[in-house]
Amino acid sequence: MSYKDDYYRLLNSLTNNIPIIEDDGELKFYEKTFSSDKAEINHYEVNPFSSDYLTNMLFNYYLNNNSYSKKYIFPSSDEKLNPFECNNIFPYKILHPVNSKPAKEIIILLHGLNERDWNKYYTWAHKLQKQTKKSIVLFPLSFHMERAPKEWGESRAMFQVSKERTNLIPNLNYSSYANAALSTRLNFEPERFFLSGIQSFFDVIQLIEEIQAGKNELIDKNATIDFVGYSAGAFLGELLFMVNHKNIFSNSRLLLLCGGSVLEETYPVSKAILDSESVNVLKEYYMKDFEKNIAKNEYLSYLFSKYEDIGIIFKAMLSNNKMQTLRNSLIKGLNNRLFVMALEKDNVFRVKGIKETFKSLDDRLIKFFDFDYNYTHEKPFPEKSIESEKVTIGFNKFFDLAVDFLR
């Protein structure tokens, strides 16, 4: 079966909630509900972060004159409650054989930045499950996928937010309805990149602890747990394994796809990810004066003090020129449990950045691919490509190697 055919077959299965018929039985994407124990990390939805009076005044002035941004992106600016409960109580998916015993081996798949649906990941999950026989958990990051308000994915409303951004910012590039929500939030409050990351970090740990406590009937409490991290999910996967909270990742493997570079070496300017201004703000905030930015924000200072081990390693993953010894030592320590797969023409996570970040890793644990068709970071396997046969060949070659590592 071609990649394209499998893509639409799986999408139809999810859309209509029907099993996936296979030669050796049936598979199904089951849905479980998750309630985050770390909802308070993002409780600052009700207030602007800055303690600077002028900044707060300008922020509120902007919102009062830009109704779509106020209504959809920062609705809590005039409400004393958290309007985004979807970020704290949400569904996640498990690809698991129908009428099967609890899985004794699973792979948790972590997605990329600013994604609104799992569509492209269904084929990935299916390929991994079929060839490893491990059940696949598709777990959403904070304020992404099912954890984001549905309005953030609606073209009409987000086009208006993009229009408001374009009117505000001269020479804005790559603004679109698809990236308007995340771009606006990070533009005004770049702290959210860290806050969402740390909530996602602890949500993954909570997920594992719930499994080990026997609270998931589809997964054995003693199941082995491996990870696949794509793009921003790769960054999160690295943090999880480097920190190794309570040693729960000591026997797990981590596969990084199209990601893993330090933040300085990422270039997420794209109509599907972030616009040019939000990336500029993000890079300046975390690359230039991050220590000062932490010091002047009481809440961030509190978090970095409370979660010092996470904060130190987060800082080590910001720039190649800072904390190299720690970063290289931690990456080298993951030898044989870490495998990196990247694309030659990836403009978000480029070859140069991958090589520099993982220079302490054994060369045999890094593999670069270049497919014989037009692809991008966002769509390494385009389902609508006119070169369908080449996409199928590229997909199988790529994931056959992934399976070799994970099996």
Image: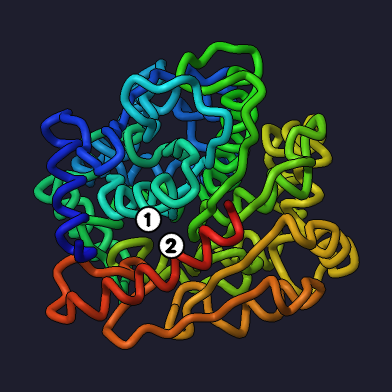
Q: Which quarter shows the N terminus?
A: bottom left
Residue 292 in percent (x, y) is at: 75, 54
**Label 1 element class:** helix
Residue at 77 percent across and 71 percent down: it is 361
The residue that mark 2 highlights is 278
Q: Earlier in the sequence, mark 1 or mark 2?
A: 1
Mark carried by residue 78? none
Front residue of 218/282: it is 218
Q: Which colour assignment does the render follow?
A: rainbow
Is 63 placed above or below 337 here?
above
Is 154 placed above or below 380 here?
above
Is 96 placed above or below 211 here?
below
Q: Quadrant of residue 20?
A: top left
The three-letter amino acid code for the residue at tag 2 is Ser
Residue at 72 percent across and 72 percent down: it is 358
Residue at 30 percent across and 32 percent down: it is 29
Answer left or right for 158 relative to 402.
left
Label 1 Cα crowd, 10 Å radius (few <14 / some 14-19 / many 20+): many
Is 125 placed above or below 373 here?
above
Residue 187 in percent (x, y) is at: 44, 55
Answer left or right for 227 relative to 165.
right
Q: Is residue 209 visible?
A: yes
The three-letter amino acid code for the residue at tag 1 is Ser
**Label 2 element class:** helix
Answer left or right for 352 relative to 97.
right
Q: Is residue 58 visible?
A: no
Distance, label 1 to label 2, CA atoms, is 5 Å
Front residue of 105/124: it is 105
Mark carried by residue 183? 1
Residue at 47 percent across and 78 percent down: it is 343
